[in-house]
Image (tube, grey):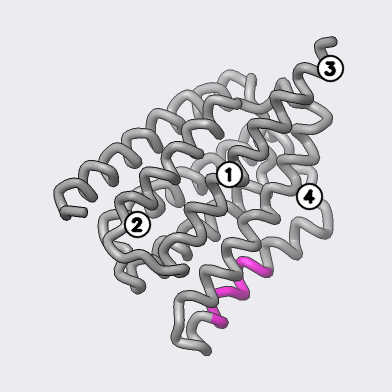
Amino acid sequence: MSWDLKMIFSGLAIILTFVAFVPYVRSILQGQTKPHVFSWIIWGTTTLIVFLAQLEAHGGVGAWPIGISGAITILIAVLAFIKRTDISIKPIDWVFFLAALASIPIWFVTSDPLWAVVVLTLVDLLGFGPTIRKAYSSPHQENLPFFLLFLIRNLLVILALESYSVTTVLFPASVALACLALVLMVSYRKTVLSA
């Protein structure tokens, strides 16, 4: 695939990142969406570290949307904390967060970003735990279009990558699948609770 086409996919992924995040941030500010603060801290941390690992693994322009997403994700964590949307922190949440931070020394000790990405992908997926727990009982507090856009965005990220390897593809593919699972679960729970 040509570099120009990869730039187009990366640009589309960045646009989708903003298209997803702007209404999500607006809905937090309006009190409609109540994200779990610790999920977003975990996701922001893991996403920024994966961005750095993808750059080292020559992900190129395909990594850019991940970096932008990491920065905005940290902003959402800050908003969730300021708005006190859901700040209940369980001991397991700390385990997820510390596991995310543990990926940095693993990367430096092994000198291979793959192991950091594997750890971070697992932690990121586990970071869905508090959100899934909350969304199961309160599915109307989640923003389905947001997660659907991130499913599509991560597919575009994969297409935009300049180098394909487990290091560059694992994270966006796993997050896309997690977003799909969350969308399906929340849709089902909304239907069940509305019946």
Q: Is residue 52 magenta?
A: no
Badge nearest the viewer, 3 or 4:
3
Q: Amino acid at mark 3?
A: Leu
Tell me if residue 147 comes above or below residue 31 in the rendering. Answer: below
Q: What residue is at 69 percent from the left and 40 percent from the top?
A: 36
The one of 14 and 78 positioned closer to us in this rendering: 14
Q: Position of residue 105 (x, y in %)?
A: 55, 82
Q: Earlier in the sequence, mark 1 or mark 3?
A: 1
| Nearest to N terminus: mark 4 or mark 1 | 1
Q: Earlier in the sequence, mark 2 or mark 4?
A: 2
What kind of residue is marked 1?
Answer: Ala
Query: Which of the numbered marks, if any, corresponds to residue 77?
Result: 1
Could you tell me which secondary element the residue under label 1 belongs to? helix
- Front label number (2 vs 4): 2
First-in-chain label (3 vs 4): 4
Give the label, 1 or 3, closer to the camera. Answer: 3
Of pointers 2 and 3, the one earlier in the residue sequence: 2
Secondary structure of the residue carrying tag 4 is loop
Determine which residue is flagged by label 4: 89
> Residue 34 appears in which quarter of the rendering?
top right
Q: Residues within 10 Å of mark 4 (few under 14, many from 20)?
A: few
- Residue 178 coordinates in the image, percent (x, y): 62, 45
The quarter of the image holding the C terminus is: top right
Residue 113 coordinates in the image, percent (x, y): 45, 76
| Tag of residue 128 | none
User: Which residue is identified by label 2?
Assistant: 63
Q: Which residues are the magenta region?
A: 99-106
